Amino acid sequence: MMTTQIRIDPAEGCWVARAEGAIIAESRAALMLTEGARAPVIYFPRADVAMAFLEPSARVTRCPHKGETAYFSIMGPSATVPDAAWSYEAPLPGVAGIAGAIAFDPALVTVERI
């Protein structure tokens, strides 16, 4: 059985997440999670996320490598972006470094290093 290689590294520089014309997150303490050959995912510490714009969603999924995923919708001034962010509140031991951090769906939210 092949296991997926997961790495969590500091994401160098300043990272932002933008949705609905607003900066939802900005951090110099973000983490970059790389899982196998997939594109890296940036995780923002909650302290650096405008949590007032995030509403917990009813959607929950489970990743065999990271654990249960809780989703959030972004409540913008003119629209809601459903299930645009997620977090592992109690991740599996190998990825405990991302506990509570917020990641954003790159198809719905612009995440970039500035």
Image: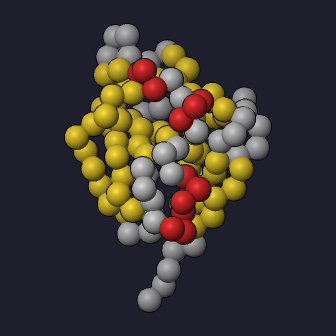
Q: Residue furthest left?
A: 58
x, y percentage for residue 96? 54, 60
Determine whether, in the image, residue 25 is placed left or right of residue 67.
right
Q: Is residue 19 above or below residue 84?
A: above
Residue at 71% from the left image edge and 50% from the top image edge: 10
x, y percentage for residue 68? 35, 57
Query: Considering depth in this image, is 42 or 56 the residue closer to the camera?
Result: 56
**Could you tell me which quadrant the N terminus lies in?**
bottom left
Query: Considering depth in this image, is 88 or 1 the residue closer to the camera?
Result: 88
Residue at 51% from the left image edge and 16% from the top image edge: 22
Residue at 22% from the left image edge and 40% from the top image edge: 58
Q: Residue furthest bottom?
A: 1
Q: Is residue 6 above or below residue 9?
A: below
The answer to whether residue 94 is visible is: yes
Residue at 39% from the left image edge and 62% from the top image edge: 67
x, y percentage for residue 43? 56, 44
Q: Is residue 64 above or below residue 17?
A: below
x, y percentage for residue 99? 51, 51
Q: Residue furthest right?
A: 13
**Could you tell me which quadrant the C terminus lies in?**
top right
